[in-house]
Image: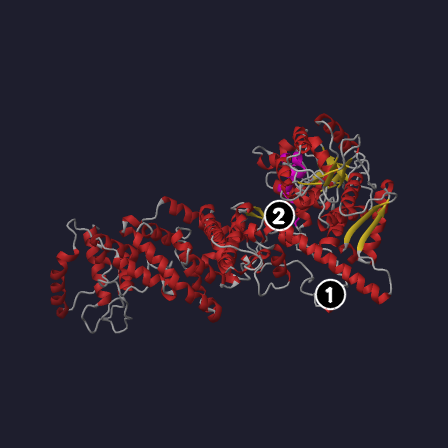
């Protein structure tokens, strides 16, 4: 059928639906003259006419009294609505009023028709008016661009979906199907299925592509959002509109598809107001939005993230904050951060995520002193258990579950926020006023590890001071000498035995003492522990525990990492001690020289080891199993593997283990090789070391169970907290070093000193750092965060330089030459050990 004939038939259907055939006794259900017919507005009639045309529905012949009227109308409109080329115009299809006042919501076809009409006239004022009217009205915008609207884009060449659109839609559908299949909560909460949203997102994007090229329309959109959002905010806060109509979410979906939201026109007023309204959405709505965004793919999810990040940065640099004017009180920053959280979880879900393999066997280390905290009115500050983010709980996915998110975790960190946030105040909001005041620690993804470590430091220190108060209170009641510290007196030659006995007694008799500040004393030495003695204590304990001769851990020469020895003869108390040491190091802000694969920190945070974790813990085994999975030949005949594996014990003797019952009788085939790999991984990373790791984790949790550590930090950040950074930037250290006793940065010996340090090799630099600070690692944030002091210690002498590791202070005599300085310094850092009075 040619276009002219199709046009004629569609026009007849439209007139039949709007005017009828004129026969009062008509029985055609698709005719306005039928007594049972429900009247339609022009938009609905136009859509219905297209539908009737496609199914070749019954078409009435005009009643004799109607023929003359139709003929007259046809003559009067012929020149007005017919193109010279015989093609049907938009007005033929959608005969709306001249000013479009009868358009109450938008569809892709309606926008196309209005846009074409405006282009023909060269005047976009009608389009601007209708965009302003619809986008400023929540009820109207909610009904726009519905999936159930008939799509007539085949009649508008300019609005045909591109190949990219089709590919994206197909990809979204596939991702949606896989997400739905993988989600364990789908049956429990059907609202989560993003496929249930009624907006045709592809149509919205095509409409925006056309509209955003018109300057007048851009201005109309900005003004409409400014007018729209205050009413939305009130609706959500006081009327619970989402609960009564879940399609209210459509408004946010449509507005956020605007790719220009990050532009200056929106950043001033429109976007801040919109974010405030969005932050008022209930958690169930935010979860639906996050799941929907997770299906968009990298490009669109990143645009969402960058939109909110840009608003946050723009607001921060446009204002000044201090201890009186806190960034936590800036409504725009707070709302945008809460919106950024939706994008963060979308990035998690859209990437590679592992919501399984969770270790639920957490140790219950509940202690009784919390009742005294309650008596002192401090129950909020010391309440038990890790926090759970409501959106995280609703979605059933945590930060630790993200193996490879769509957008790297680092991209969600906003440095402008980290520069101005007052962590002491933020910590108080986080622990005490969480219901009334916003804390950035409730959105830890936006904070860098340096800022988060400050929050953890405040938590640890306040807990230490509280333990001192409790000790003093108990001592007053019981008439005993107060002991406000966790005191360890150890002998260098028996450091493991002494530490183990003391810590084991404390953990059994009064575990709360582990929350006190650590105070170490080496028997026969006179050093006072202001931090430096503790550092050496940790170092000596770890040196002995990780000694291969003891056999608690195995060492891989290739990765230079330690792993738990599944055949170790040591008792569980030794592993508990290692866990305690790691926990105490975090609690007392000390850096340790430990070398574990990342899977250890993931397991400490509550996950189980998986196949991907083998890549850094057991790289050779990982490569072998990967080759097995990728093998294209006959697995059974070529590999000749069974479900029985072999590994070596403590003495190097082979040990056989059946992954399944009678595993030596079950060959590995192409069909069951994935099961073989999963069971092999489960054995190596979890089952074989279950006894050792459980004791290790028990010790770690004795110290950190009440800490926000698990909530704030990802596994790689926990490693950085414990081990510090291996990257040593001595240029940054030089810039932040302070001088005392008559030295300054311009003193000749100071210039010689830094030239000498910069000329050292990597190992010599680490020895110097160990000598001065008690550790050869940089703290979180790098050496620039280390406040080192160089103090004058007399005039030229043969004495060696000395140090106060507690205060990161180097006592340097004013040597007469650069050569003597180098020789004395090298001797000091190479042979120094122990503490004594200076």
> Label 2: few (<14), some or many (≥20) within 10 Å?
some
Residue 768 image position (x, y, % from top left): 72, 34
- Identify the residue at the far top of this view: 819
Q: Is residue 354 visible?
A: no
Q: In the visual, does 819 lie left or right of 70?
A: right
Q: Quadrant of residue 425?
A: bottom right
Q: Which residues are magenta?
A: 607-623
In the image, 556: left or right of 324? right
Give the residue number, with chain letter if any, for mark 2: 450
Task: Look at the picture and state if 664 lies above or below 455.
Answer: above
Majority SS type along the magenta span = helix
Does 222 lie within the magenta span?
Answer: no
Q: Is residue 798 visible?
A: yes
Determine the CA span between mark 2 and mark 1: 29 Å
Q: Secondary structure at mark 1?
A: helix
Question: Secondary structure beneath disc 2?
Answer: helix
Disc with the residue nearer the chain's start (2 vs 1): 1
- Report whether 641 appears left or right of 509: left
Badge 1 is on which residue? 373
Q: Name which residue lies at 76% across and 29% down.
A: 824
Q: Position of residue 801 (x, y in %)?
A: 76, 34
């Amino acid at each position: 059928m040619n276009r002219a004939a199709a046009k004629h038939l569609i026009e007849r259907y439209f007139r039949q639906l709007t005017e009828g055939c004129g026969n009062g006794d008509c029985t055609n259900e698709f005719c306005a003259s039928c007594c049972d017919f429900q009247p339609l507005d022009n938009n609905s009639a136009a859509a219905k006419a297209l539908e009737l045309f496609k199914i070749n529905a019954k078409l009435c012949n005009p009643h004799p009294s109607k023929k003359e009227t139709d003929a007259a109308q046809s003559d009067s409109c012929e020149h007005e609505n017919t193109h010279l080329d015989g093609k049907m115009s938009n007005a033929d299809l959608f005969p709306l009023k001249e000013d479009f006042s009868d358009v109450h919501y938008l569809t892709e076809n309606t926008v196309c028709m209005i846009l074409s009409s405006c282009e023909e006239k060269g005047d976009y004022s009608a389009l601007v008016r209708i965009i302003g009217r619809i986008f400023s009205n929540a009820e109207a915008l909610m009904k726009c661009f519905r999936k159930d609207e008939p799509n007539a884009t085949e009649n508008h060449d300019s609005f045909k979906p591109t190949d990219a659109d089709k590919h994206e839609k197909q990809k979204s559908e596939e991702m949606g199907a896989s997400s739905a299949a993988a989600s364990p909560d789908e049956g429990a909460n059907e609202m989560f299925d993003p496929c249930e949203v009624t907006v045709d997102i592809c149509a919205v994007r095509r409409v925006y592509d056309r509209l955003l090229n018109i300057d007048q329309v851009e201005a109309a959109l900005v003004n409409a959002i400014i007018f729209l959002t205050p009413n939305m905010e009130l609706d959500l806060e006081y009327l619970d509109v989402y609960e009564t109509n879940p399609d209210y979410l459509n408004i946010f979906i449509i507005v956020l598809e605007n790719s220009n939201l990050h532009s200056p026109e929106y950043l001033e007023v429109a976007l801040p107001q919109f974010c405030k309204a969005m932050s008022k959405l209930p958690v169930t709505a935010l979860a639906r939005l996050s799941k929907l965004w997770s299906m968009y793919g990298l490009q669109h999810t990143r645009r969402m993230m960058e939109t909110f990040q840009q608003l946050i940065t723009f607001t921060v640099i446009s204002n000044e904050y201090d201890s009186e004017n806190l960034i936590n009180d800036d409504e725009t920053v707070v709302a945008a951060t809460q919106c950024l959280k939706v994008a963060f979880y979308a990035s998690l879900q859209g990437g590679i995520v592992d919501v399984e393999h969770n270790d639920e066997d957490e140790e219950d280390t509940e202690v009784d002193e919390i009742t005294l905290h309650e008596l002192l009115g401090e129950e909020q500050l010391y309440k038990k258990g890790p926090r759970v983010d409501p959106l995280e709980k609703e979605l059933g996915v945590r930060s630790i579950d993200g193996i490879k998110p769509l957008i790297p975790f680092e991209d969600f960190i906003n440095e402008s926020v980290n520069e101005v946030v007052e962590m002491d105040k933020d910590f108080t909001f986080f622990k005490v006023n969480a219901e009334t005041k916003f804390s950035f620690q409730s959105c830890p993804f936006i904070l860098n590890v340096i800022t988060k470590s400050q929050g953890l430091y405040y938590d640890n220190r306040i807990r230490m001071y509280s333990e001192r108060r409790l000790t003093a209170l108990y001592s007053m009641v019981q008439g005993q000498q107060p002991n406000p510290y966790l005191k360890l007196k150890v002998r260098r030659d028996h450091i493991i035995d002494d530490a183990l006995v003391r810590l084991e007694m404390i953990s059994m008799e009064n575990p709360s003492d582990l929350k006190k500040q650590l105070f170490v004393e080496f028997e026969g030495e006179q050093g006072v522990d202001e931090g430096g003695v503790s550092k050496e204590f940790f170092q000596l304990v770890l040196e002995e525990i990780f000694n291969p001769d003891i056999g608690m851990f195995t060492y891989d020469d290739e990765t230079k990492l330690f792993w738990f020895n599944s055949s170790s003869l040591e008792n569980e108390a030794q592993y508990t001690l290692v866990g305690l040491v790691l926990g105490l190091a975090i609690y007392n802000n000390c850096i340790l020289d430990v070398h574990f694969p990342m899977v250890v920190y993931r397991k400490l945070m509550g996950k189980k080891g998986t196949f991907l974790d083998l890549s850094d813990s057991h790289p050779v085994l990982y490569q072998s199993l990967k080759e097995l999975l990728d093998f294209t030949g006959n697995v059974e005949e070529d590999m000749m593997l069974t479900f029985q594996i072999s590994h070596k014990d403590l003495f190097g003797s082979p040990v056989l283990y059946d992954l399944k019952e009678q595993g030596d009788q079950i060959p590995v085939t192409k069909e069951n090789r994935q099961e073989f790999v999963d069971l092999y991984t489960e054995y190596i990373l979890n089952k074989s070391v279950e006894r050792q790791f459980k004791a290790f984790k028990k010790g770690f949790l004795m110290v950190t169970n009440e800490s926000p550590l698990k909530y704030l930090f990802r596994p790689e950040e926990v490693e950085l907290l414990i081990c510090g950074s291996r990257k040593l930037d001595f240029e940054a250290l030089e810039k932040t070093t302070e001088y005392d006793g008559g030295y300054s940065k311009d003193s000749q010996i100071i210039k010689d000193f830094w030239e000498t340090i910069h000329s050292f090799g990597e190992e010599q630099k680490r020895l110097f750092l160990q000598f001065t600070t008690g550790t050869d690692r940089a703290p979180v944030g790098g050496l620039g965060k280390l406040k080192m002091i160089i103090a004058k210690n007399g005039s030229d002498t043969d004495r060696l330089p000395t140090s106060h590791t507690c205060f990161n202070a180097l006592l340097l005599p004013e040597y007469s030459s650069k050569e003597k300085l180098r020789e004395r310094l090298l001797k000091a850092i190479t042979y120094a050990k122990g503490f004594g009075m200076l």
